[in-house]
Amino acid sequence: LNTEPETVVVIGDSLDDADAARHVGTRCILVSGGSVHTPNLLAGTGFPVVEHLHEAVDLVLGSSLQQTHSATEFPSIRIS
């Protein structure tokens, strides 16, 4: 894909997703709704945790940043 890791955001719902994102150097947002892991366990990864997929998409697009995460952590990306 010829993509730099810092331009990628993994949206996942498991500890394995967080580990994979960390391993390749990407950012990550974890979705707790429907996950086999508790929100507290997901939060322990240090990545933002949201309840619904649309909230993760909003974070990536920059339209609904949570107070605990700065705009520079998830800058708006170009969708092409």
Image: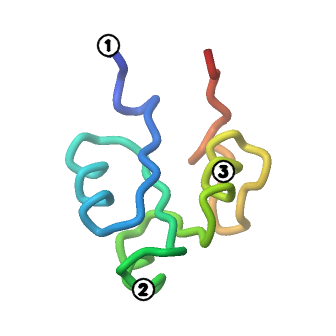
CA separation in Å, label 1 and label 2: 34 Å
Nearer to us of marks 3 and 2 is 2
Q: Please report the residue visible at 65 percent of the width from the left and 68 percent of the height from the top.
A: 68
Residue 76 percent location from the top left of the image: 67, 34
The numbered dot on residue 38 is 2
Q: Residues within 10 Å of mark 3 (few under 14, many from 20)?
A: many
Amino acid type, residue under disc 2 in the picture: Thr
Amino acid type, residue under disc 3 in the picture: Leu
The numbered dot on residue 2 is 1
Nearer to us of marks 1 and 2 is 2
Mark 3 secondary-structure assignment: helix
Residue 44 percent location from the top left of the image: 37, 78
CA separation in Å, label 1 and label 3: 24 Å
Closer to the N terminus: mark 1 or mark 3? 1
- Left/right placement of residue 77 relative to residue 63 reads left
Closer to the N terminus: mark 1 or mark 2? 1
The residue wearing badge 3 is: 59
Mark 2 secondary-structure assignment: loop
